[in-house]
Image: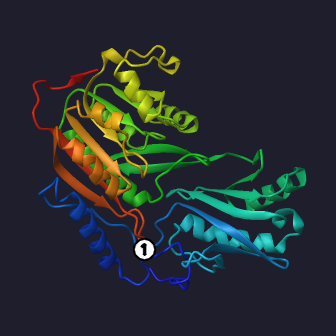
Amino acid sequence: MNCKHFGSCGSCGLYDLGYEAQLKQKELRVSKLLAPFYEGSLEVFDSPTEHYRARSEFRIWHEGDRCDYAMGSIEKKGAINIEECPKVIEPIEKRMWALLEKINASQEVLKKKLFAVEFLATTTDECLITMLYHRKLDDVWSSEAKVLEEALNCKIMGRSRKQKVILSDEFVTEKLAIDDKVFTYVQYESGFTQPNPVVNVKMIEWAITQAKTVGYGDFLESYCGLGNFTLPLSHYFNKVLATEISKNSIYAALENCGLNVVSNITFARLASEEMTEALNGVREFTRLKGIDLKSYNFSTVLVDPPRAGLDKGTIELISNIENIIYISCNPDTLARDLETLTDTHTVVEAAMYDQFPHTEHVESGVFLKKTVSNHPSICL
């Protein structure tokens, strides 16, 4: 990818390396961190080098009567105006500049106190644009934004303090071909979504490959989000219990379950620590009313925690489960957690996924199997 803002825009820090060199640098970093726990080769999943990001946010910089997109500078001192951003997927790219042109051509209604624009798009050409303001939005704004929505063939929302204006929908619908099946995901504006659809499919298919080697029991997932991994992996287990703290994500996950006609998943709104307390019988939750935790026979667990990694209680809990699929957005905390997990388990497969080309960020995954086991699965 070539971009005229390399070296000044803080969004891409590895601008001075070719993509293959970037990928090798990340592979060496992850391999070094995993070396104390894994002797096999690291499977590397690359990314398209441009038009790969399906979710982006841009500041709006006002200069006189004109608005421009802006990003933080690479020196972390203020922001720079940008004239291109080749990392966004094409459904965003073809609309973002037309949007800016129409904002600048408008009167004050669309541009007044506009401070940021967020884009959420799909590989099927749906695009949701959220315009963020430091002022209350009225019917005049809604009327002009509706014209804009129709002109750009997209969905537009407005947000300001304690206000959300939905003109048509607050979601997009993504369809991903995964392991010879097509899965439908409703993705809401306020919920977490994987930013790189191509690499996301590779991550899910890698997890499916590991799940297929198990072939029995029930499946437990923590940090399930909108069901990104849950739905495809549910086909390889008897029953699934998936937990997530975000109420909006749980709502989306339930909706996605219906859209994909999946009936063996139970979703529960619990933080990872709460899930541990519930499954260990330490505490009862009204949110689990009607769910018989003792009926589950977990053979496999998938965790996909935030950058901070797993808490101690969750590590202790999953250490009792035969198979662990650990997806990580921070290889440093993954390595830290493996220091404990490898007391009971062995890393049998490891992978790296380049979700964020041209940056230092890297995702990784490991599949662990219990080293010594007297039972085919764990009843909790």
- Between residues 275 and 220, which one lies in front from this camera angle? 275
Q: Percent position (x, y) of residue 358?
A: 42, 74
Q: Position of residue 110 (x, y in %)?
A: 82, 63
Crowd tier of the residue under label 1, counting other residues whose Cα lies within 10 Å: few below 14, some 14–19, many 20 or above: many
- The residue lying at 30 percent from left, 77 percent from top is 20
The amino acid at mark 1 is: His
Q: Does residue 148 appear in the picture of this structure?
A: yes
Which quadrant of the view contains residue 109?
bottom right
Q: Residue at x 52, y 72 (%)?
A: 11
Q: Nearer the viewer, residue 198 or 217?
A: 217
Q: Is residue 156 above or below residue 32?
A: above
Q: The N terminus is located in which quarter?
A: bottom left
Location of residue 348 with respect to 298 vertically, above or below: below
Residue marked by disc 1? 358
SS for callout 1: loop
Above or below residue 92? Residue 339 is above
Can I make out residue 262 in this image? no
**Which of the 4 image quadrants contains residue 369?**
top left
Number of labels in the image equals 1
